[in-house]
Image (cartoon, helix red, strand yellow):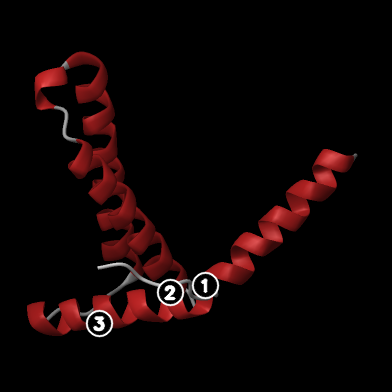
């Protein structure tokens, strides 16, 4: 399924809606620690695929790598949401700050 262009705030809302549905299905309550643990797990899956790509080529799976990237992004967005942060604002602040640093 292809999505059309959407604003970051809309993407964040869709991610949270999806994660809320999963929480309801699993009968779980989201929290920062659990979300962080899931994020680390996804980064571990990314690491495994990169190790596979370099050293265990027969086990490398491009689709698993892509899924881990997407899942890590979802967990980052969710973590920001749980902290009451707007991911777009957070990232734009960093970009602006880095631009200033690069100019100096």
Residue located at (51% from left, 78% from top): 9
Residue at numbered disc 2: 11
Disc 1, disc 3: CB below 8 Å? no
Question: Sequence-wise, which precedes: disc 1 or disc 3?
Answer: 1
Earlier-in-chain disc, 2 versus 3: 2
- CA separation in Å, label 2 and label 1: 5 Å
What residue appears at the point 26 percent right and 17 percent down from the top-left corner?
A: 54
Q: Where residue 47 sits: x, y (%)?
A: 28, 33
Q: Say which residue appears at 88% left-offset and 41% top-offset.
A: 103
CA–CA distance between discs 1 and 3? 18 Å
Q: Residues within 10 Å of mark 1 (few under 14, many from 20)?
A: few
Count residues near mark 2 (Cα–Cα under 10 Å), then give few for <14, some for 14-19, many for 20+: some
**Vertical arrangement, residue 48 with respect to residue 30, above or below:** above
For label 1, the SS is helix
Which residue is label 1 attached to? 8
Kindly report which numbered mark, 2 or 3, lies closer to the viewer in this rendering: 2
Circles 2, 1 touching at the beta carbon (< 8 Å):
yes
Q: Is residue 19 toward the left or the right of residue 56 in the image?
A: right
């Amino acid at each position: 399924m292809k999505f059309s262009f959407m604003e970051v705030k809309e993407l964040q809302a869709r991610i949270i809606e999806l994660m809320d549905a999963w929480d309801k299905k699993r009968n779980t309550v989201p929290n920062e620690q659990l979300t962080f643990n899931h994020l680390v797990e996804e980064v571990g899956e990314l690491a495994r695929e990169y190790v596979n790509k370099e050293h265990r080529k027969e086990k490398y799976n491009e689709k698993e790598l892509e899924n881990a990237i997407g899942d890590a992004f979802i967990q980052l967005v969710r973590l920001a949401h749980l902290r009451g942060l707007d991911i777009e604002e957070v990232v734009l602040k960093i970009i602006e700050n880095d631009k200033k640093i690069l100019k100096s």
